Image: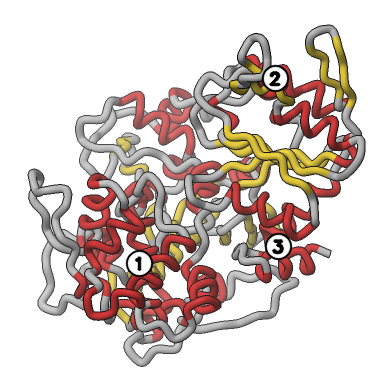
């Protein structure tokens, strides 16, 4: 059923992902009243979704645009000037009352747009209507036929919506369309247009610029129409301002994405460079069609018993030793290259072979895994396409704690434990000291936040950090205290018979026995 709805939305000009159509299909079937809260940035298609749905399903659409300070009375009664009335004002049914009355005769859609602009008291007003369909006003009452009412409430983030109101309807979160969907929409109406690829680059850069309202499909179509109409007289800078940016501030933000260094006090209406929107689309087209990068979990064969898929790095530029030691594979962009360079102490003779990473094709291969306490150094690459391997040392009891936080164990044996959660693969191997050497493979797009929630990596300590913070790290990672056989690089270690504990930055504890330290940090 949702596949049919998805196809109908596309056919009627609303381009979306199949997953969104599935969410909408469910929202249309719920009771006591169908509908949903629609949340997403400006220009992501909340209003057009409801308009298209009403057209596809043949329903009457009752639309109301909320304004700052909208009251519940405004939802019931609409006052308009009227010369024929004694008071000069005529009262019409407001959107909610109109929908309630209409539902007694036919199915209707009610859309309340930008609900977070209403007064908080309006939340309470909607509770009973969404539950029972009752409306009471001026001593009268009206009860809607909820089987004929579908309510969509669109909102941004201007105020918090009451918890009780949010419980009445499901929430559908919309986001801006992927470029491929925009391309399909433009090709449907402007097939063969020479500037479609330029329009796609413009769309992506509007998103990068974080404009107040990025380019919509309709605006891009208008832009292409204008280029066709004007022909040789078309000026890219002027037309982009006319149809897309529309304000000096947005035009300036877009200019910042062109990759050129800009002055702090430059003019807002600095002309856009048409060359910045040429040739790039071909590279972007190749990127869209590029196969997914190999999963490190497959390379290292970190698979559950139920999984049999196998993959390897297939590149003559990597030796077997480099593959074995690889600590991550990240899509090569200017930003990720810059972030990797920030981890290097010294430049190298070959810019493709850095201290910590190697450029292989369109990917950056990290040469070694990253210690979990250094995870903050990877944080700038959150959202990049790729994966990073973190290593840690945990006792068995701490792995059970990870399970309580959401890590799903898929293999459980004395010598090897495998686990998974969203965007994360985990392997723990028993070492000679009785603790586990752990590898945590994190997808930078899907698993970064889950990584911080489940594994709670310790903050990186420096020479000026106090004794209390170092104790907190010891308490969270007790294997650093117990396991003196492991190498000391980049981690805490137990040294000498006197029990001196030290950190790699040289911050030392006073001389204490191991038992004294264990007792002090709460291990015993």
Q: Is residue 364 visible?
A: no
Q: Earlier in the sequence, mark 3 or mark 2?
A: 2
The residue at which mark 1 appears reads as 368
Please determine whether, in this image, residue 390 is positioned above or below residue 132.
below
Position of 276 compared to 16: left or right? left
At 72% from the left and 70% from the top, the residue drawn is 7
At 48% from the left and 62% from the top, the residue drawn is 218
Displayed quadrant of residue 496: top left
Q: Earlier in the sequence, mark 1 or mark 2?
A: 2
Q: Earlier in the sequence, mark 3 or mark 1?
A: 1
Q: Is residue 272 visible?
A: yes
The residue at which mark 2 appears reads as 91
Q: Residues within 10 Å of mark 1 (few under 14, many from 20)?
A: some
Residue farthest along the top direction in this orientation: 139
Query: Decide: marks 3, 1 in contact (CB < 8 A)?
Result: no
Q: Nearer the viewer, residue 66 or 514?
A: 66
Q: Position of residue 443 (x, y in %)?
A: 49, 61
Q: Position of residue 519 (x, y in %)?
A: 48, 25
At 47% from the left and 78% from the top, the residue drawn is 190
Q: Residues within 10 Å of mark 2 (few under 14, many from 20)?
A: few
Kindly report the distance in space between the C-alpha atoms of the residues bearing marks 3 and 1.
25 Å
Position of 290 compared to 333: left or right? right
The residue at which mark 3 appears reads as 411
Please determine whether, in this image, residue 518 is positioned above or below residue 110.
above
Q: Position of residue 383 (x, y in %)?
A: 42, 57
Q: Quadrant of the N terminus?
A: bottom right
Q: Nearer the viewer, residue 351 or 34?
A: 34
Say what secondary structure mark 3 lies in: strand
Displayed quadrant of residue 13: bottom right
């Amino acid at each position: 059923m949702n596949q049919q709805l998805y196809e109908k939305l596309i056919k009627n000009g609303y381009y979306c992902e199949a997953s969104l159509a599935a969410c909408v299909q469910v929202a249309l079937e719920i009771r006591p009243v169908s509908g949903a809260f629609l949340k997403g940035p400006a220009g992501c298609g909340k209003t057009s979704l409801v308009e298209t749905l009403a057209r596809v399903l043949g329903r009457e659409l009752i639309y109301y645009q909320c304004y700052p300070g909208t009251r519940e009375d405004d939802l019931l009664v609409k006052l308009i000037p009227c010369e024929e009335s004694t008071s000069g004002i005529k009262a019409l049914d407001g959107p909610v009352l109109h929908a309630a009355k209409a539902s007694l005769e036919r199915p209707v859609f009610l859309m309340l747009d930008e609900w977070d602009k209403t007064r908080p008291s309006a939340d309470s007003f909607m509770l009973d209507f969404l539950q029972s369909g009752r409306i009471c006003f001026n001593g009268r009452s009206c009860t809607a036929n909820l089987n004929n009412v579908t309510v969509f409430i669109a909102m941004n983030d201007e105020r918090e919506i009451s918890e009780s109101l949010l419980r009445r309807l499901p929430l559908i979160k919309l986001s801006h369309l992927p470029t491929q969907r925009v391309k399909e929409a433009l090709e449907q109406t402007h097939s063969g247009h020479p500037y479609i690829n330029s329009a796609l680059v413009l769309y992506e850069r509007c998103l990068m610029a974080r404009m107040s309202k990025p380019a919509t499909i309709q605006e891009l179509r208008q832009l292409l129409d204008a280029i066709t109409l004007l022909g040789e007289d078309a000026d890219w800078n002027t037309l982009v301002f006319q149809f897309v940016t529309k304000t000096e501030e947005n035009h300036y933000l877009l200019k910042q994405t062109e990759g050129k260094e800009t002055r702090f006090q430059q003019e807002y209406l600095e002309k856009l460079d048409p060359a910045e929107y040429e040739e790039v689309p071909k590279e972007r087209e190749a990127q869209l069609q590029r196969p997914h990068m190999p999963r490190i979990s497959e390379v290292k064969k970190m698979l559950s018993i139920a999984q049999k898929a196998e993959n390897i790095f297939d590149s003559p530029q990597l030796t077997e030793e480099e593959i074995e030691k690889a600590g991550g594979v990240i899509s090569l962009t200017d930003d990720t290259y810059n972030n990797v360079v920030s981890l290097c102490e010294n430049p190298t003779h070959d810019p493709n072979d850095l201290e910590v990473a190697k450029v292989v094709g369109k990917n950056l291969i990290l040469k070694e895994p990253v210690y979990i306490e250094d995870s903050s150094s990877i944080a700038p690459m959150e959202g990049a396409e790729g994966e990073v391997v973190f290593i840690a040392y945990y006792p068995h009891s701490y792995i059970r704690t990870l399970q309580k936080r959401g890590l799903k164990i898929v293999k459980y044996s004395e010598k090897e434990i495998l686990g998974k959660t969203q965007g994360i693969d985990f392997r723990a191997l028993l070492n000679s000291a009785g603790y586990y050497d752990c590898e945590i493979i994190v997808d930078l797009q899907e698993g970064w936040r889950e990584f911080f929630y489940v594994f709670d990596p310790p903050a990186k300590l420096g020479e000026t950090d106090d004794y209390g913070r170092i104790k907190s790290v010891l308490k969270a990672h007790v294997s650093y205290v117990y396991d003196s056989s492991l190498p000391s690089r980049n981690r805490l270690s137990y040294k000498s018979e006197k029990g001196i504990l030290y950190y790699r930055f040289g911050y030392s504890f006073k001389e204490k026995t191991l038992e004294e330290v264990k007792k002090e940090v709460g291990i015993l």
